């Protein structure tokens, strides 16, 4: 059994939805289908989910949101009309739209309103495919604290879905114990797909999007980076954490713990192989074949702060690192990396979403508590992760990295190699970020041909 999930661009208009239908029907195998709300049809377009959030926001300040809602209704009506669904037995889009509108008028909350994009998307696809529609509210459950409740959800999935093989299910939301709709964070249909795959013990979770797979480098920086054919869950996690995004980060957990692989595929080029994401141990023991490349991918992010604390005889001062970390904890700052020397200790902090006052407070406290001889703050650091199981015990990796950066005239501010040799983190100045990523990507291509 497979679970197929289709993202927003795959559901954006009637032509895309009919491609989706072709893919779903291309094999006879059992499958469950999870869908997102219609996304952008062109770069300047607005996603239905954003239109729905805007509708809810407008309702908070005025009674009449007919105009906002009409734009949403128009997107779904256009799809249903082009697919000639009007008149299909039991299909009542107008009735569904009316019901949603009256709930919005009645003050429905943001989660309910936003979730209606996925609800209607699945409602339409189920009718078009003539397959059962299962409301995610019936199978995905959150506990009283609003956390995803895996045990109850898995029980519900099995109880409901066993009798509804082939069902089309809306992504992005579920329900609380009291029945109120609750959404995951944005992009959460990926999570819904992974949950159904985990609960139903799928052979594979196929995640359809609008790119050929997981890229080995950021396509906004290097031209046509290669698509990774096979990647382990751990490599994926490292690359996603550093900004490479195709999948919602939480979507790997329900499938990874059950050894279910994920395949990223392109709805618009289903013949492309895509990227297969597989359990780390299975990749390492050779169960999945892939080219023996030293590097799997490169990803990075700007906007980090590096604080270097220097104090002579620091190594004799017990509890120094603990006290430094306690200051970060006090100011609620999360530690990314901590390279150290005999008399120096550095901490690299993610600045995204952190107010300047918290950083200033932390620095003052470090000075007063630790009395360093020197405190150097580098405020504009970018981190680049070079990731791949192939680096393990391979000689010359570090030298290839440093000479590529040297040739590109990039100054390395810090290097941190994890003990598993899965990941080498390089810090460079923000201004050098793109140059450094390009140089490292080119270096990886050279290593490949050697
Ligand atoms: N429609 C939701 C969003 O735009 C969820 C999803 O597409 O996965 O975030």
Image (spheres, rainbow, N blue to C red):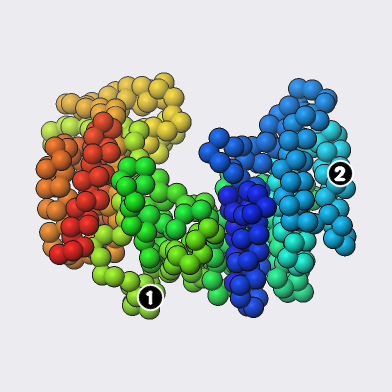
Q: Nearer the viewer, residue 312 or 420?
A: 420
The reply to whether residue 355 is in sight is yes
Q: Is the residue indicated by label 2 positioned so its CB lies within 8 Å of ligand 1?
A: no
Residue drawn at (18%, 60%) of the image:
447
Instruction: Kindly check if marks 2 and 1 are in contact, taking CB atoms under 8 A apart as contact.
Output: no
Q: Which mark is residue 51?
A: none
Q: Residues within 10 Å of mark 1 (few under 14, many from 20)?
A: some
Quarter assignment of residue 276: bottom left
Q: Nearer the viewer, residue 276 or 358?
A: 276
Q: Earlier in the sequence, mark 2 or mark 1?
A: 2
Task: Tell me the SS state at disc 2.
Answer: helix
Quarter of the image for the C terminus: give it: bottom left
Question: Residue 369 at x, y = what percent?
Answer: 30, 27
Question: Residue 248 at x, y = what percent?
Answer: 52, 51
Q: Is residue 413 left or right of residue 87?
A: left
Residue drawn at (62%, 55%) of the image:
16
Quarter of the image for the N terminus: give it: bottom right
Task: Tell me the SS state at disc 1.
Answer: loop
> Image height check: is 244 above or below 271?
above
Residue drawn at (58%, 49%) of the image:
9
> Image height check: is 95 above or below 260?
above
Q: Which residue is mark 2?
A: 99
Question: Residue 363 at x, y = what percent?
Answer: 32, 25
> Image height check: is 257 above or below 148?
below
Q: Which residue is mark 1?
A: 288
Q: Nearer the viewer, residue 41 or 300?
A: 41
Q: CA distance from mark 2 to mark 1?
A: 49 Å
């Amino acid at each position: 059994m497979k679970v197929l999930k289709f993202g927003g661009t795959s559901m954006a208009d009637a032509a895309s939805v009919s491609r989706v239908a072709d893919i779903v029907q291309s094999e006879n195998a059992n499958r469950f289908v999870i869908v997102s709300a219609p996304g952008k049809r062109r770069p300047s377009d607005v996603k239905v989910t954003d239109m729905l959030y805007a509708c809810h926001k407008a309702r908070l300040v005025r009674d009449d949101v007919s105009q906002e809602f009409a734009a949403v209704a128009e997107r779904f009506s256009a799809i249903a009309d082009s697919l000639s669904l009007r008149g299909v037995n039991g299909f009542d889009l107008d009735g569904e739209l009316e019901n949603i509108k009256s709930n919005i008028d009645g003050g429905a909350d943001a989660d309910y309103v936003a979730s209606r994009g996925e609800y209607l998307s699945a409602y339409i696809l189920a009718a078009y495919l003539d397959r059962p529609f299962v409301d995610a509210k019936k199978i995905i459950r959150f506990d009283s604290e609003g956390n995803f409740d895996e045990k109850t959800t898995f029980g519900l999935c099995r109880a409901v879905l066993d009798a509804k093989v082939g069902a089309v299910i809306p992504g992005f939301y579920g329900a609380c114990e009291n029945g109120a709709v609750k959404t995951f964070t944005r992009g959460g249909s990926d999570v819904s797909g992974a949950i159904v795959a985990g609960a139903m013990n799928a052979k594979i979770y196929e995640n359809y999007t609008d790119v050929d797979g997981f890229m080995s480098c950021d396509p906004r920086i290097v031209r046509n980076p290669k698509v990774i054919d096979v990647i382990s869950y751990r490599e994926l996690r490292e690359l996603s954490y550093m900004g490479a995004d195709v999948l919602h980060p939480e979507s790997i957990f329900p499938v990874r713990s059950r050894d279910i692989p994920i395949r990223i595929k392109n709805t618009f080029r289903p013949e492309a192989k895509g990227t297969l994401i597989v359990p780390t141990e299975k990749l390492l023991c050779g169960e999945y074949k892939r080219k023996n490349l030293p590097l799997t991918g490169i990803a990075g992010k700007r906007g980090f702060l590096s604080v270097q604390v220097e104090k002579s005889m620091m190594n004799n001062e017990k509890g120094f690192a603990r006290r430094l970390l306690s200051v970060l904890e006090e100011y609620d700052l999360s530690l990314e990396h901590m390279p150290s020397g005999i008399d120096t200790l550095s901490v690299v902090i993610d600045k995204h979403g952190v107010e300047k006052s918290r950083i200033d407070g932390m620095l003052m406290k470090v000075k007063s508590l630790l009395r360093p001889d020197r405190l150097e703050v580098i405020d504009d650091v970018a981190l680049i992760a070079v990731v791949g199981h192939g680096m393990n015990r391979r000689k010359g990796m570090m030298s290839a990295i440093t000479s590529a950066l040297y040739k590109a005239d990039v100054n390395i501010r810090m290097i941190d190699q994890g003990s598993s040799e899965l990941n080498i983190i390089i810090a460079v100045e923000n201004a050098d970020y793109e140059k450094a990523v390009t140089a490292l990507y080119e270096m990886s291509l050279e290593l490949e041909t050697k």
